[in-house]
Image (cartoon, rainbow, N blue to C red):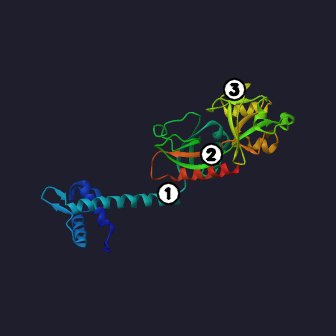
Amino acid sequence: MRKLGNIRRLAYFVSVVEAGSFTAAAERLGITKAVVSHQVARLEEELNTTLLIRTTRTIRLTDAGKVFYEHCASILRETEEAFAELDALVAEPSGTLRLTAPFDYGISVVVPAITAFSQRYPDCKVDAVISDNKFDIVDKDIEIAIRVGWLDDSHLQARKIGHFRQLLIAPRNMQPQVEKINKPQDIKPLPFIANTALREPSQWHFTLNGSDQQSVNVQPSIFINNTLAVREAVREGAGISVLPDYVVSDDLISGRLIQVLPEWELPSGEIHAVFPASRFRPTKVRSFLNILMEKDKER
């Protein structure tokens, strides 16, 4: 295995190729033309291969030079990225973090994560858009977009940060009626609040012990297009509904709301963070995701 005397020679060689001449490469590198010429010559000697054909006015890559240049350029890019990522790992988050999240998960989990992030890294600012609208994150210069449910942004990079369960929920004042329910079909007579932000707000598929399945088509008495508003209607005693666990966990602990048929499971969903396509994530992005995942696990 050949050992190159100095990786700088690779950088000199690449600079000559990309600048188009030894003179232009020397100016770009801030050294003399003689040093560049000498180092490239040493590189050719070590490789025992001619990389460049020199004339009085131009340079031209040999066939071997073309192959070697592609590898050298790739090595130098990887090296720069490695140093940049290492610097980021030891650096404190800085700048402004731009993110977006859907309204219900944003209010319940992301906002507490933003608060914790700002307290931990006071020199880093956060610009958050809490909205159910899905933005073009590249066009809007958004660094993190939280997606709850199912991903459809195939051109973006994604990282799973958690999951959620859908729960059949009732207000405490409906306890006597809830106690009489033994199977999903029994909920049909009860007043139901439909979340019209969902694809199928009136049809629900229940599973018991991973095998027994029942589907129920409810007849809603109230239709609301916002998850947190549906939760408020259930809190006020308007009826039962299906809600994600992250918006009702505190109410279940306090007893304000009760879970109906807890042994029967509804389809669960995943929570992802998506990013513009990139090989490198700034420190602020990684640090915020760590905090967000902590908050997601706490619920």
Asked where in the image residue 208 lies, by quadrant, the reply is top right
- Give the image location of residue 244, x and y in percent: 69, 40
Q: Is residue 17 left or right of residue 237?
A: left
Between disc 2 and disc 3, the foreground one is 3
Disc 1 marks which residue? 88
Residue kind at label 1, given as amino acid type = Ala
Residue kind at label 2, given as amino acid type = Ile
Q: Earlier in the sequence, mark 2 or mark 3?
A: 2
The structure residue drawn at horizontal position 82% and vertical position 42%, both measured from the top left corner, is: 255
Vertical arrangement, residue 62 with respect to residue 121, above or below: below
The structure residue drawn at horizontal position 27% and vertical position 60%, both measured from the top left corner, is: 69
Between disc 3 and disc 1, the foreground one is 3
Disc 2 marks which residue? 114
Task: Give the camera-side residue of 253 and 97.
Answer: 253
Vertical arrangement, residue 170 with respect to residue 62, above or below: above
Asked where in the image residue 109 lies, by quadrant, the reply is top right
- Which element type, helix, strand or loop, lies under badge 3? strand
Residue at the far front in the pictured view: 212
Task: Give the camera-side residue of 215 and 145.
Answer: 215
Q: Earlier in the sequence, mark 3 or mark 1?
A: 1
Q: Is residue 108 left or right of residue 286?
A: right
The quarter of the image holding the N terminus is: bottom left
- Give the image location of residue 277, x and y in percent: 45, 47
- Give the image location of residue 283, x and y in percent: 52, 53
Tag on residue 223? 3
Vertical arrangement, residue 235 with respect to residue 92, above or below: above
Asked whether residue 26 appears in the rendered view, the answer is: no
- Give the image location of residue 25, x and y in percent: 25, 58
Q: CA distance from mark 1 to mark 2?
A: 20 Å
Find out whether the residues at labels 1 and 2 contact each other: C-beta distance under 8 Å. no
Q: CA distance from mark 2 to mark 3?
A: 31 Å
